[in-house]
Amino acid sequence: MKAKSGRRVFLVGRDLLGRTPISKPFVGLTDADSIRKALRDGSSDSSWIAGDEASLDQLIRTAVATGRPRHCVGRLAVLKRPRPESLAPAQSLFDLVLANGKWLPDQELLDALGATRRQDLIIGGLVDPGTETVTLYRGDLRPLAVPFSLFPVSATGASPDFRRFKPIDYGHAVRFGAYESAVDAILYNADPDFRRREKAKRRDADQGLGPALRRLRLQRGLRPSDFGPVSERTIHRIESGRIRSPRVGTLEAIAARLGVEAGEIETF
């Protein structure tokens, strides 16, 4: 998938770089010089991924020595559990630090981080039984906290086992033991911005002759077979979008049955 122009994802440390192929938008950082350059080039939209504790230590050591006291280099994710003492300086340097979570496998993680709509994918997360919440880490490294109640018993009777959380399917789903939930469904319920975007997409997809014909036909209480001499198959093909510009005679026959002018159908 093509990455957004100008967006950078900095991968810190040989541990992560040695196991994954690197290409745009990713920038591999293996020493202090490359980290210093990245700190100069980074922005609030940058994502930083530290593969292990040694990588995080090197990043913090270089950043502090370089003198970056302001929150201006983006968000940081630490894939392996860091020392508690290292989180304080990391939080002073980055807008947001995600740590102590469960993550996608390396290659799936990189695919999600490089996706055009990475904010709509889940790359990791953390479960807290005390507050009965799941904090999900999105592909742009923004967290989203959702309640356990967002995951009801499925139609097949499966219940979520929150002790066995795992992001799967390149960030498109999450698993709680034998229970799975699509990320789109989670975001639709928990993120108003995502819900607005999805509704707008659905409205756009619902434009044109086909959807308008279906709405008007249903309003009139007609079946696809009620438009003779136009065949039921033709009605289905128009409504599904496979026929976008029917013949003038066909359209006039459909309009007559609906009781409207041919040019009015798309207004419904």
Image (spheres, helix red, strand yellow):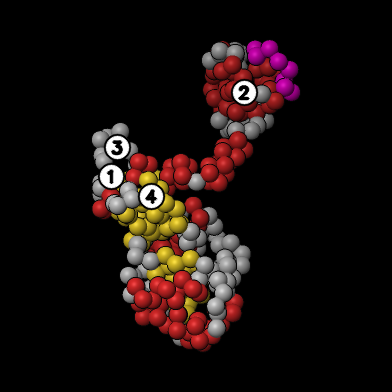
- Residue at position x 35%, y 41% in the image: 149
Instruction: Identify residue for label 3.
Output: 153
Q: CA distance from mark 2 to mark 1?
A: 42 Å
Question: Which stretch is magenta?
Answer: 256-264
Q: Are marks 4 and 3 in contact (CB under 8 Å)?
A: no
**Three-letter amino acid code of the residue under disc 3:** Val
**Three-letter amino acid code of the residue under disc 2:** Leu
Could you say which is closer to the camera, residue 228 or residue 108?
108
Dot 2 alpha-carbon crowd within 10 angstroms: few under 14, some 14 to 19, many 20 or more: many
Instruction: Identify residue for label 1.
Output: 160
Q: Position of residue 188 (x, y in %)?
A: 48, 42
Element type at marker 4? strand
Element type at marker 3? loop
Q: CA distance from mark 4 to mark 1?
A: 13 Å
Relative horizontal placement of residue 75, taking residue 200 as reference (left or right): left
- Which mark is first along the chain, 1 or 2? 1
Q: CA distance from mark 2 to mark 3?
A: 38 Å
Residue 121 bears which disc, if any? none
Q: Is residue 202 placed above or below 73 in the rendered structure?
A: above
Q: Are marks 2 and 4 in contact (CB under 8 Å)?
A: no
Relative horizontal placement of residue 246, taking residue 124 as reference (left or right): right
Q: Are marks 2 and 1 in contact (CB under 8 Å)?
A: no
Dot 1 alpha-carbon crowd within 10 angstroms: few under 14, some 14 to 19, many 20 or more: many
Dot 3 alpha-carbon crowd within 10 angstroms: few under 14, some 14 to 19, many 20 or more: few
- Which mark is first along the chain, 1 or 4? 1
Q: Position of residue 66 (x, y in %)?
A: 54, 85
Instruction: Identify residue for label 2.
Output: 213
Give the mark toward the camera: 4 or 1. 1
Instruction: Identify residue for label 4.
Output: 173
